[in-house]
Image: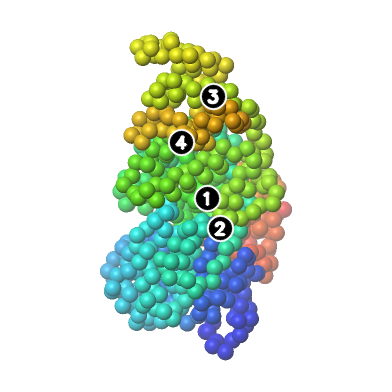
Amino acid sequence: MPAHDPQATPADELSQARRLLNRVFGYDDFRHHQGEIISTLLAGGDALVLMPTGGGKSLCYQLPALLREGVGVVVSPLIALMQDQVDALRQLGLRAAFLNSTLDAETVHATEQALLRGELDLLYVAPERLLGERMLSLLERARIALFAIDEAHCVSQWGHDFRREYQQLSVLHQRFPAVPRIALTATADQRTRQEIIDQLQLQEAAVFVNSFDRPNIRYTISDAPNPRERLWRFLEQEHPRDAGIVYCLSRKKVESVAEWLTARGREALPYHAGLSDGLRRHHQQRFLREEGLIVVATIAFGMGIDKPDVRFVAHLNLPKSLEAYYQETGRAGRDGLPADAWLAYGLQDVITLRQMTQDTDATEDFKRSAHQKLEAMLGLCELTSCRRQALLAYFGETLEAPCGNCDNCLQPPQTWDATEAARKALSCVYRSGQRFGVNYVIELLTGKDDERIRRNGHHRLSTFGIGRELNAVEWRVLFRQLLAQGYLDTDLEGHGTLRLTARARLLLRGEIELHLRRLRRPERGARERRGRTVLALGEAEQALFEALRSRRRALAEAQGVPPYIIFHDSTLAEMAQRRPTSLGEMAGIPGIGETKLNRFGKAFIEVIREHPG
């Protein structure tokens, strides 16, 4: 790597970084604020970077680490991913290593000695190890180019991925005041950004906020019955062979959904905290290294996942916040190619999460914050306008026009005047004593002849049978919407008992009207499968693309690395379209740096020559 020239001007340094970007990583120029961020670090300054997943965050610290004297130390919260991150860097010809609890004593010693001898470009360290006095003392004996704190939102106690160790990382500023630091995250609202700055002592840092928009992701939120069948229809129609992630709220549901998908012909691996460390690592490695697998997981899975060809992220339960939703859906389509964020939710999700936000030992401030975050998530689900505009607005960004790539834009929902039906529902809750759950109240509304209702004397209520114009499914949708919009609440004891809120009085007194979205029925018949058209390739190009993938798979298996570490799908698609037949022609394809060109170029050219256009 080039030596740092203390006499170089900022323009000279950025030019040098751009040349390195092309030679090592195979890209012609910087995106977003990468150039400004790199210049900040090269000048010795600190930076806080908010950039969407797949936006190129890692280059913001990798290039300065290569250009400054010493090693770039990367704090990463998930040790299970460090091996693949280091493998990817080594494929580029860089000197990378990691230190975590998976290594034996001999490997740890060898890595520490390489660090002290200045033989590493980048070193990945778990926060728990970094905070140990032995590791800090070791770093004081080495030359450090910079510290990169990845997944910096973990510092926030208000966030969805809180890690207590992250709050102690201010020690880096105290022990190494002259070493620049960069904190990076893909998602953080204004409160979380401020907490990152305060906890990590980044008050003097330059703050770079890129667009949160991921235009390649299509957002779809489904509220129809039978979520599993809807998921299966979605997989068959949109992603019959693609890799993806299905998130569930509980471990039990993770296991059952994984078994169900596998029984129906899609290999699905469970992942949750109740599995052994070894089995979790095995499933994660299979997902990263094989193609077309599905992982069914709790939120324990995914932070920092580098797999670029995840074509869909599906939720079978409602996420707790828009931050969590954005972070989890952002694991789809990191390569910039079309991907789906698909969510199914229903009444029970609303009730369960409402209760979960209250049933904790947390402070009232925390409960209030969790409640507000859940309300924002529910607001996105019940929206009738562009979902992307609302999602970006939550993070303080304005999208001037509807996106055209969410379900509400592609299939605008119908609305109806639900004022009278809502009044009936609220009146029935009130007249039955606010002591019963949704199912019982629906039976009252529809006039069901039930022994329990008669025993309670509720068959004599004025609201008994006044709601026969709607069926039970339609009433459940209405109750979900009344809960989501704050006209009803549930008890704090976990029984699901409905009670009216202050807002309900406005509706009951006729002071406001209520217009709600209608239940969107599942589309009949198969839609066009996007799995084959995701790369916009012709028939001959698609055949070549599959042959290139086959060669990539063989090379990856021989080296024991995930296929995407050799080349991304987007790079193979460029090869299939351009059909380079020489190393010189191949060098112009994005994502092919000097080392990879020399290592793999001839193998892929051979495949291209075997498939004439």
Q: Residue at x 54, y 68 (%)?
A: 207
Find out whether the residues at labels 1 and 2 contact each other: C-beta distance under 8 Å.
no
**Amino acid tagged 3:** Arg
The residue identified by callout 1 is: 326
Q: What SS does tag 1 mark?
A: helix
The spot of residue 373 in percent (x, y) is 48, 47
The residue identified by callout 4 is: 350
Camera-near label (3 vs 1) is: 3
**Amino acid tagged 4:** Val
Q: Residue at x 49, y 16 (%)?
A: 463
Q: Residue at x 40, y 75 (%)?
A: 173
User: Distance of mark 2 from mark 3, alpha carbons?
Assistant: 43 Å
User: Distance of mark 3 from mark 4, alpha carbons?
Assistant: 20 Å
The residue identified by callout 3 is: 423
The residue identified by callout 2 is: 52
Camera-near label (3 vs 4) is: 3
The spot of residue 361 in percent (x, y) is 31, 47
**Amino acid tagged 2:** Pro
